[in-house]
């Protein structure tokens, strides 16, 4: 099965058959019978999307525990350095980089 089989008009959408013309997959690449399905929405795997014709998988979402941990230690939410617990003063412009001037801790998430 090539990367365009699931975009084809003849794709069977089955775990047992590839397509109506070639049940076990195309005999060669590119498939000579490939025909883009115009009336159906283009199928894509869950957690992925097409950008410029290329299938891109989305990064996994944070779990509940990971989100809670982020809320408990990141200076954006606590206002304190996670290393030395010194308060980080708010700036007039919203911060992009969270760096502690007391202990040298730097946020490397960006």
Image (tube, grey):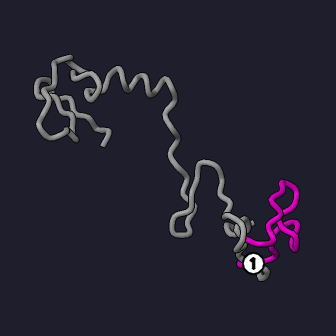
x 83%, y 54%: residue: 15
Q: Position of residue 2 (x, y in %)?
A: 71, 68
Q: Position of residue 14 (x, y in %)?
A: 84, 57
x 36%, y 24%: residue: 71
On the rendered structure, is 26 left or right of 75? right
x 32%, y 22%: residue: 73
Which quarter of the figure has residue 13? bottom right
Q: Position of residue 76 (x, y in %)?
A: 27, 29
x 71%, y 78%: residue: 30
How many labels were placed on the picture? 1
Which quarter of the figure has residue 74? top left
- Residue at the front extreme? 39
40 within the magenta span: no
Q: Is residue 20 above or below residue 73?
A: below
- Residue at the bottom extreme? 32
12 within the magenta span: yes
Q: Is residue 90 above or below residue 26?
A: above
Q: Is residue 74 above or below residue 110?
A: above
- Regarding mark 1 in the picture, which secondary structure is present there? loop
List the residue tagged with mark 1. Answer: 34
Q: Quadrant of the N terminus?
A: bottom right
On the rendered structure, is 40 left or right of 53? right
- Region in magenta: 8-30
Q: Quadrant of the C terminus?
A: top left
Which quarter of the figure has residue 75? top left
- Classed neighbour count for the residue bearing mark 1: other residues with Cα under 10 Å, few (<14), some (14–19), many (≥20): some
Q: Is residue 14 above or below residue 102?
A: below
Q: Position of residue 57 (x, y in %)?
A: 55, 52
Q: Main secondary structure of the magenta part?
A: loop
On the rendered structure, is 30 left or right of 27? left
């Amino acid at each position: 099965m090539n990367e365009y089989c699931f975009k084809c008009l003849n794709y069977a959408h089955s775990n047992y058959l590839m397509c109506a013309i070639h049940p076990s997959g195309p005999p060669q690449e590119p498939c000579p019978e490939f025909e883009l399905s115009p009336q159906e929405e283009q199928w894509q795997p869950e957690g992925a999307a097409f950008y410029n014709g290329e299938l891109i998988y989305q990064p996994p979402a944070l779990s509940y525990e990971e989100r809670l941990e982020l809320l408990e230690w990141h200076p954006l939410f606590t206002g304190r350095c996670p290393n030395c617990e010194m308060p980080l003063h708010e700036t007039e412009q919203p911060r992009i980089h969270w760096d502690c001037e007391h202990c040298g801790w730097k946020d490397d998430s960006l």
